[in-house]
């Protein structure tokens, strides 16, 4: 007989508990799976809280990217200030409103060590440091996660502030924008840095988990007479904003923009270089933006910051990434879906949201690449059940399935890349020049390509030499104009640069030359691999091919420059070695001439009139050794100039093509008559100078 009563005892209880149906809010889910959003921590301690790892880096990244999206959406040259202030323990406690605990029972604490254990730890730390220093000196990568914070010690706390001059946020929308996970304004089909409606909320969730502090927001939109101040956090279980303060304050300075501030646990010492690198690479791909980055160390008192002692304090960091151009790429445009890139759910959503009533209008309106004749052919192909004027909202599930199948099988024109906003060769080149100061650089922008119905553009730059560039291939990757700093190994750019480019054939030494490889991919959909949005897989053939071709184009340009440089060097070398022999040769020639000139006059007649004249001059000292030397020098100069000219004609760089250009600072308010854009520069012509 089967006993169908619930089992008693421990096992029975557990099974009852396991079968209880529960729901999770998105906020709860992401708070438990922070790594999905790049807030992964180095190691999880006994309380499950974890040692803060990448979270400080990701917080900076999310805030900066929102700030850039915001300024660019209103075609404003971005001016962004990021400040990371590290709190002392006392300051953090003051901010949290708690009394600093005085340790009475030392042995209670996790970092308690006996004298012997302390000695052992210090010795190990010294050994590890030595190992890391050696690895760094040998040019090897030191994994940040190798450097762990010691468990039980006070976790460093940081106030992160990001201020921009973007469009700001509407007063009433702020609580939902920043206090509800998966809410945002970037869900349309458009190239944007942000996409998921998650980043800033993850910073807040992390603040809530690590320090319990809410987020502070100041914001003002164009022409608004007030500034919104909002202090809020998230009700994790309900995924709704929990507003502490939401008020309007006078905006006397007519400020427009947003300022967000979160207080989080983090790890500056390990992620310092990543954060600074991120800012630097952002400056490369966004040379039309101005960034000011500050780190204020824990010992610094804000009031003392301007004193000499504070400025020279090695812990504080202030870096200004200056704006180098006011040429901003045209803003990306919202586009429509390509029929080959939609799934059943998406078709259903489009049907629910469309403003068109007839089936034929729906096809033309909601998809890119379907014009009226094509729409008619598609409807014809679907069979008698369908007609052009039928109500699109009345399509049955089966009919939608048929439409989807046809979309997958039919041939459509590829979408063009007009909706995309690449950085542009001019900006890419400028960014590389201003941040790396290379000896040589070449850039290239490929034509729009398509991957799974989404257009994408690959831009590339290859530089040689420069500041802070190590010998070998140094890869800089950008996706939708965001620098990607982690998980480099599997990325399509790294793999292509390391394995598929034959650097030797372009006269570049892969091991010894300081090669900078810059690749920026923009698309309405970046095929990121992994959860962290940190790398693009190598398996997307269309992208791998486009990356390789863009890099090869840069290399071809560089090879031309290298060959020209080599030839110029050879010429100089030849000239120098010829010039070296001029004194000896002049002396020898003059000695021979003197001997002949000193001989009998009758014998001189044998040499003909010209020579007789010359020999007479030698005899009279009108021609001396110095004269011979001068003539030989002139001759070497002339041969050199002729060779240079011949070379210039061959390579198309003739002097007649040159124009003298006078430069002066431009008056930004003066209207510019003509603007000429070329891949390497913009020339603005003003009238009436
Ligand atoms: N500095 C800012 N200026 C103006 N609006 C902002 C700013 N920061 C955030 N927002 C608004 O808040 C929304 C939510 O931002 P959040 O960072 O959470 O997600 P997202 O940027 O949309 O997407 P992702 O998660 O991919 O970063 C944004 O879509 C934007 O509308």
Image (cartoon, rainbow, N blue to C red):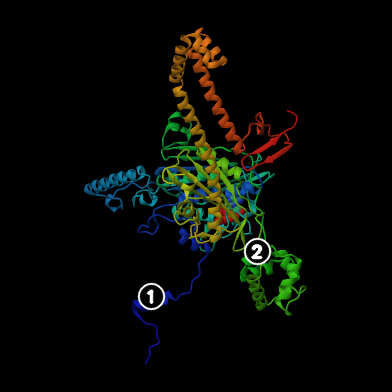
Mark 2 or 1: in front is 2
Q: To which quarter of the image does residue 469 belong? A: top left
Quadrant (top left/top right/bottom left/bottom right) for the C terminus: top right
Residue 677 can be seen in this image: yes
Q: Position of residue 356 (x, y in %)?
A: 75, 67
Q: Is residue 173 left or right of residue 214?
A: right
- In this rendered view, identify the residue nearer to me: 100 or 92: 92
Q: Is residue 305 above or below residue 279?
A: above
Q: Position of residue 604 (x, y in %)?
A: 51, 12
Q: Which residue is mark 2?
A: 338
Outermost residue toward the bottom in this view: 1
Q: Secondary structure at mark 2?
A: loop
Instruction: Tell me what residue is drawn at x 53 percent, y 37 percent.
Output: 564
- In this rendered view, identify the residue nearer to me: 622 or 218: 622
Quadrant (top left/top right/bottom left/bottom right) for the N terminus: bottom left
Q: Secondary structure at mark 1?
A: helix
Instruction: Tell me what residue is drawn at x 56 percent, y 37 percent.
Output: 322
Q: Position of residue 504 (x, y in %)?
A: 46, 47
- In this rendered view, identify the residue nearer to me: 266 or 393: 393
Q: Is mark 2 within 8 Å of ligand 1?
A: no
How many numbered discs, if any? 2
Give the CA distance from mark 2 to mark 1. Answer: 50 Å
Q: Position of residue 426 (x, y in %)?
A: 61, 42
Q: Is residue 564 above or below residue 420?
A: above
Outermost residue toward the right in this view: 389
Residue 241 can be seen in this image: no
Q: Which residue is mark 1?
A: 14
Outermost residue toward the top in this view: 620
């Amino acid at each position: 007989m089967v006993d169908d009563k619930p089992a008693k005892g421990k096992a029975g209880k557990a099974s009852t508990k396991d079968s209880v149906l529960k729901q999770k809010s998105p906020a709860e889910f992401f708070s438990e799976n922070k790594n999905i959003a790049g807030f992964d921590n180095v190691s999880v301690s006994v309380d499950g809280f974890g040692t803060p790892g990448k979270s400080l880096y990701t917080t900076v990244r999310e805030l900066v990217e929102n700030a850039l999206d915001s300024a660019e959406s209103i075609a404003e040259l971005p001016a962004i200030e990021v400040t990371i202030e590290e709190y002392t323990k006392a300051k953090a406690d003051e901010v949290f409103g708690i009394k600093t605990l005085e340790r009475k029972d030392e042995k209670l604490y996790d970092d308690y060590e006996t004298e012997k254990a302390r000695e052992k730890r210090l010795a190990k730390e010294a050994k590890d440091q030595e190992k890391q220093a050696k690895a760094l000196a040998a040019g090897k990568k030191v994994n940040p996660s190798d450097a762990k914070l010691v468990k039980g010690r006070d976790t460093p706390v940081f106030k992160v502030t990001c201020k921009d001059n973007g469009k700001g946020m509407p007063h009433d929308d702020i609580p939902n924008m920043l206090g509800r996970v998966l809410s945002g304004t970037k869900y349309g089909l458009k190239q944007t840095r942000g996409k998921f409606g998650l980043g800033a909320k993850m910073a807040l969730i992390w603040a809530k988990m690590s320090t319990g502090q809410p987020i502070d927001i100041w914001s003002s939109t164009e022409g608004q007479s007030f500034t919104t101040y909002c202090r809020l956090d998230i009700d994790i279980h309900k995924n709704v904003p929990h507003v502490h303060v939401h008020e309007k304050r006078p905006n006397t300075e007519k400020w427009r923009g947003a300022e967000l501030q979160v207080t989080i646990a983090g790890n500056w010492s390990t992620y310092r270089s990543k954060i600074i690198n991120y800012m630097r690479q952002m400056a490369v791909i966004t040379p039309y933006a101005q960034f000011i980055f500050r780190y204020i160390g824990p010992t610094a008192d804000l009031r003392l910051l301007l004193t000499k002692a504070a400025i020279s304090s090695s812990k504080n960091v202030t870096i200004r990434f200056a704006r180098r151009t006011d040429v901003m790429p045209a803003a990306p445009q919202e586009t429509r879906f390509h029929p080959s890139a939609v799934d059943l759910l998406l078709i259903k959503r489009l049907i629910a949201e469309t403003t068109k009533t007839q089936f034929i209008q729906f096809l033309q309106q909601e998809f890119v690449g379907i014009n009226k004749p094509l729409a008619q052919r598609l409807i014809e192909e679907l069979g008698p059940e369908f007609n052009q004027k039928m109500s699109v909202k009345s399509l049955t599930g089966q009919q939608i399935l048929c439409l989807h199948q046809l979309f997958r099988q039919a041939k459509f024109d590829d979408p063009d890349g007009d909706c995309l906003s690449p950085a542009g060769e001019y900006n890419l080149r400028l960014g590389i020049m201003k941040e790396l100061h290379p000896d040589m650089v070449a850039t290239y922008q490929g034509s729009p390509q398509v991957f799974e119905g989404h257009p994408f553009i690959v831009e590339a730059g290859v530089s040689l030499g420069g500041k802070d560039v190590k010998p070998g291939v140094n890869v800089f990757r950008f996706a939708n104009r965001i620098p990607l700093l982690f998980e480099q190994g599997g990325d399509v750019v790294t793999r292509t640069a390391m394995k598929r480019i034959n650097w030797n054939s372009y006269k570049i030494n892969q091991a010894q030359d300081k090669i900078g490889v810059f690749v920026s991919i923009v698309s309405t959909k970046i095929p990121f691999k992994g959860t962290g949005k940190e790398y693009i897989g190598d398996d997307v053939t269309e992208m791998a091919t486009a990356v390789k071709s863009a890099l090869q184009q840069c290399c071809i340009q560089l090879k031309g420059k290298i060959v020209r440089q080599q030839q110029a060097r050879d010429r100089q070398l030849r000239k120098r070695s010829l010039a070296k022999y001029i004194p000896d040769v002049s002396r020898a020639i003059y000695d021979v001439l003197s001997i002949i000139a000193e001989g009998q006059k009758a014998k001189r007649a044998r040499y003909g009139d010209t020579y007789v004249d010359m020999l007479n001059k030698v005899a009279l000292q009108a021609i001396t050794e110095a004269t011979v030397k001068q003539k030989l020098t002139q001759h070497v100069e002339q041969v050199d100039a002729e060779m240079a000219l011949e070379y210039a004609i061959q390579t198309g760089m003739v002097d007649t093509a040159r124009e003298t250009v006078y430069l002066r600072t431009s008056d930004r308010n003066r209207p510019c008559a003509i603007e000429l854009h070329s891949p390497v520069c913009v020339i603005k012509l003003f009238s009436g100078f």
